[in-house]
Image (cartoon, coloured by chain):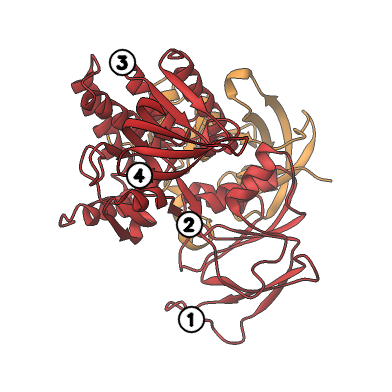
């Protein structure tokens, strides 16, 4: 059986960042990635990122992926990869089972494991929500920005969080007509600068509205939307039919934490963090010693935070394995401060209260 | 209402504009009204004219004495929330960010668009700049009527 010091499950922003810091500390790692290449969801982000320079602000996501991948390449002797490989089991004896691109199963044993599996898109229940033409917004972004395929010509976006607003803008850039963005809540969920950007393009954003049903013969042809009151109940008589050939659902993400449940980590349902998340301490270690987490799997946030969390946990794991980074203290302090800064505004409130709830602390 | 439609109220917009005398020179109008964690406007400004500060959630503040209206912040703002405005020779001049292809051409007449996405008049493309360092966000110089100084925000090509 293969044996590694650090096994990283997921080659997205936090996994890559952790591999870099661990390598700088002197620790070798193996990154397991189910996609054909590493980079995670960053590879489809064509917009400039927010944050500060330290988190590569104003750089487009796709270029941030390149930076992180190149940083890891500088440690080729310490970082290895298995792509198109899926982790199918994580066990208490620190053995993971993987299925590779040839559908061959094998086992790998690790001294420490970082679960950086990210999150997946939530779905919405409505009549005929399985018609072809109904997509997750993230899936549309992959289809369009990675594979160059348009999802349709006339689109309605359900959900006005940052993903919904950004993907709507990118659809418009690709020449797709975004007929409307609808939002069930009474206010726009994402950054208002994204909303204003769409509004300037003539895209209508309607709050207190959701999709009630979809119609189509074999594929999506139209949807019925309806107004909601402040208790999220349909207001009778407000149905409106919109003809579309694609519908994007962008109603949030939930952490991909199944492997952590499987290995017996204590889990907690924290709605503010997106769903079922592992109970962790300040070093991002789960209740199973030497199993760590970073990124969306322990609470859905922006990719900027996922990168910083990855760096932070990479340092901690190095230290745990007896290989302390030469600038350990300074960097830990720096990354902690960066995370606090990213989470300190009103948009960080959800994460702050979620983390407090997870740690059983009183939240101010 | 910004929170429900994405369109800022007139009163809110006016908080970001200096008076017309100051606008005799080009000045950055930062339409970033809510606290979000972001500061490239501050770090990209070569004249230290924009301040966000230690807490990067603080909305930017422009020092109009220092701002030269160069437009560097316009293409560095990840939210595309900055334009440069100027009143000169009985015309309103703007520098706006633009991320659509095909790009408009110099001399082309385009629709002038307000913050609600409505056509409010005509505008003329004066200059199109897209250098490598702009990372695919073009900077477009455009002129229109002075009455549109607080209304104009972007262009739409006529087809």
Please give the residue where the numbered disc 1 appears in the rendered image.
Answer: A233
Query: Is there one chain holding both mark 1 and mark 3?
Result: yes
Mark 1 neighbour class, 10 Å CA radius: few under 14, some 14 to 19, many 20 or more: few
Q: Residue at x 49, y 30 (%)?
A: A58
Secondary structure of the residue carrying tag 2 is loop
Q: State which chain disc 4 sits on.
A: A
Q: Residues within 10 Å of mark 4 (few under 14, many from 20)?
A: some
Cβ atoms at labels 1 and 4 below 8 Å apart: no
Q: CA distance from mark 1 to mark 2?
A: 20 Å
Query: Separation of disc 2 and disc 3 at Cα?
Result: 37 Å
Helix, strand or loop under label 3:
loop
Q: Are marks 2 and 3 in contact (CB under 8 Å)?
A: no
Number of numbered callouts drawn: 4
Q: Nearer the viewer's eye, disc 1 or disc 4?
A: 4
Q: Residue at x 46, y 59 (%)?
A: B3
Residue B154 locus on image (x, y percent):
64, 43
Q: What x and y, as percent, mark residue A312?
A: 29, 30
Tell me which chain appears red: A
Which mark is in front, 4 or 3? 4
Q: Which residue is mark 2?
A: A252
């Amino acid at each position: 059986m293969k044996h590694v010091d650090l096994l990283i499950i997921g080659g997205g922003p936090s996994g890559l960042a952790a591999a870099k810091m661990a390598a700088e500390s002197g620790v070798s790692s193996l990154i397991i990635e189910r996609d054909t290449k590493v980079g995670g969801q960053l590879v489809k982000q064509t917009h400039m990122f927010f944050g500060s320079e330290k988190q590569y602000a104003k750089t487009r996501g796709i270029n941030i992926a390149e930076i992180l991948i190149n940083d890891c390449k500088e440690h080729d002797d310490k970082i290895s990869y298995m792509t198109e490989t899926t982790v199918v089991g994580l066990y208490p004896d620190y053995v993971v089972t993987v299925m590779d691109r040839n559908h061959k199963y094998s086992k790998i044993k690790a001294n420490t494991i970082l679960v950086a599996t990210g999150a997946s898109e939530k779905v919405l229940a409505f009549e005929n929500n399985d018609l072809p033409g109904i997509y997750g917004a993230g899936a549309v972004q992959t289809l369009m920005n990675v594979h160059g395929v348009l999802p349709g010509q006339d689109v309605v976006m359900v959900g006005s969080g940052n993903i919904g607003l950004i993907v709507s803008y990118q659809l418009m850039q690709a020449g797709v007509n975004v007929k409307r963005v609808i939002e069930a809540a009474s206010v726009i969920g994402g950054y208002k600068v994204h909303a204003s950007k769409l509004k300037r393009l003539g895209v209508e954003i309607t709050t207190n509205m959701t999709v009630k049903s979809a119609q189509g013969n074999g594929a999506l042809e139209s949807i019925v939307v309806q107004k909601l009151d402040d208790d999220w109940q349909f207001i009778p008589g407000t149905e409106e039919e919109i003809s579309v050939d694609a519908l994007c659902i962008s109603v949030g993400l939930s952490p991909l934490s199944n492997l952590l449940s499987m290995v017996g980590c204590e889990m907690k349902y924290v709605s503010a963090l997106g769903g079922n998340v592992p109970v962790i301490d300040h070093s991002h270690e789960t209740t199973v010693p030497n199993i760590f987490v970073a990124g969306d799997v322990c609470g859905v946030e922006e990719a900027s935070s996922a990168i910083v969390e990855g760096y932070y946990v990479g340092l901690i794991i190095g230290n745990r394995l007896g290989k302390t980074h030469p600038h350990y203290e300074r960097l830990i302090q720096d990354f902690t401060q960066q995370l606090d800064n990213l989470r300190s505004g009103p948009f960080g409130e959800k994460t702050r209260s979620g983390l407090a709830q997870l740690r059983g602390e009183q939240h101010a | 209402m910004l929170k429900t439609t994405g369109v800022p109220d007139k009163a809110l917009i006016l908080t970001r504009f200096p008076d017309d005398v100051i606008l005799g020179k080009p000045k950055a109008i930062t339409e970033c009204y809510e606290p979000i964690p972001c500061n490239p406007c501050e770090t990209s400004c070569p004249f230290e004219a924009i301040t966000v500060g230690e807490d990067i959630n603080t909305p930017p503040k422009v020092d109009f004495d220092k701002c030269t209206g160069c437009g560097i912040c316009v293409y560095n703002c990840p939210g595309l929330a900055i334009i440069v405005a100027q009143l000169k020779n009985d015309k309103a001049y703007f520098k706006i960010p633009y991320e659509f292809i095909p790009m408009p051409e110099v001399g082309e007449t385009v629709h002038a668009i307000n913050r609600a996405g409505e056509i409010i008049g005509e505008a003329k493309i004066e200059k199109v700049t897209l250098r490598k360092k702009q990372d695919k966000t073009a900077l477009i110089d455009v002129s229109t009527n002075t009455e549109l100084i607080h209304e104009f925000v972007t262009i739409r090509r006529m087809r």
